[in-house]
Amino acid sequence: MSEKVILILVDGMRPDGMMQCGNPFAQKMVENSTYSLKARTVMPSVTLPCHMSLFHSVDPERHGILTNGYVPQVRPIKGMFDRFDDYEKKCAFFYTWEELRDLGRPDHLDVGLCINQHKQSDTDIKITDAAIKYINEANPDFLFLYLGETDEVGGHDCGWMSEQYMKSVSKALSCVEKLQNSISDDYTIILLADHGGHDRSHGSDMPEDMTIPILFCGKPFPKGKELEGDVSIKDVAVTIAKLLQVPPAKEWEGMALCAN
């Protein structure tokens, strides 16, 4: 029987920021998950290229997105929304940064909602509440929730690991906790970041920019198990496909991080 999956991405959340922000849910999530706090994103460690690699399981030089401006793929690869819809999985997309709209085509989504206010306070709360309402009403197979305040309000405005950044990380984690407590435990929740950051920037190959957390919390995953070896943002799409019992697209390069 296939699983149902909620994928939550906190933009710019460094693993050390997650664990040091003072929110006790961070440690609770680790204890209840199969996880890596040393996973790697892709270069350039920039939001849209990283999201395209997350959804298409290839490096940026393959999908062709190297900046935060979208261009059509020369050799198109199906992303998660398109691939899962082909197998009649109900997919949804809740986000706060309009540039992400091309991660999937609208006709492959049951619903797509953008609250394009990522530079405003409490946008993460608004989009989380909307996602919770939809999940409980529509029971989707796969939903992607993007939380963007950590990157914009925390990192770029005040600096990574600053007091405001830590508050933004903590608030995002509280959103994740609220969602987890508000929906059926039939869902596997996957929490990750697209990239980290340093000073008030990101995009380099520095460890601070490239290292991300990835946590899998749900019935198919042992609790408190740290993943060994190299873990990549490209592995997430293949893992979700396996949970949904959908064959991965032949171009996808990642590896499944679940046993079943």
Image (cartoon, rainbow, N blue to C red):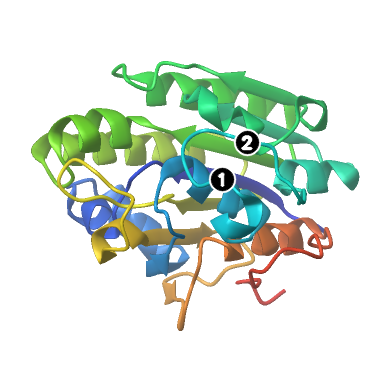
Q: Residues within 10 Å of mark 2 (few under 14, many from 20)?
A: few
Foreground: 165 or 98? Answer: 98
Q: Secondary structure at mark 1?
A: loop
Q: Give the camera-side residue of 39 and 260.
A: 39
**Mark 2 sits on what residue?**
71
Taking 161 as reference, is 150 above or below it? above
Q: Residue at x 47, y 36 (%)?
A: 68
Residue at the limit of the structure toward the right, as seen here? 87
Disc number at residue 65? Answer: 1
Is 38 displayed left or right of 61 in the figure? left
Residue type, numbered disc 1 = Ile
Residue 87 spot, x, y in % from top left:
89, 48
Q: Position of residue 57 (x, y in %)?
A: 64, 59
Which image quarter holds the N terminus?
Answer: bottom right
Q: Can you say which quadrant of the picture contains the C terminus?
A: bottom right
Q: How many residues crowd around disc 1 within 10 Å: few (fewer than 14), some, or many (20 or more)?
A: many
Residue 68 showing in the rendered view: yes
Q: Can you say whether 201 is above or below 240 in the image?
A: above
24 relative to 177 in the view: left or right? left
Q: Earlier in the sequence, mark 1 or mark 2?
A: 1
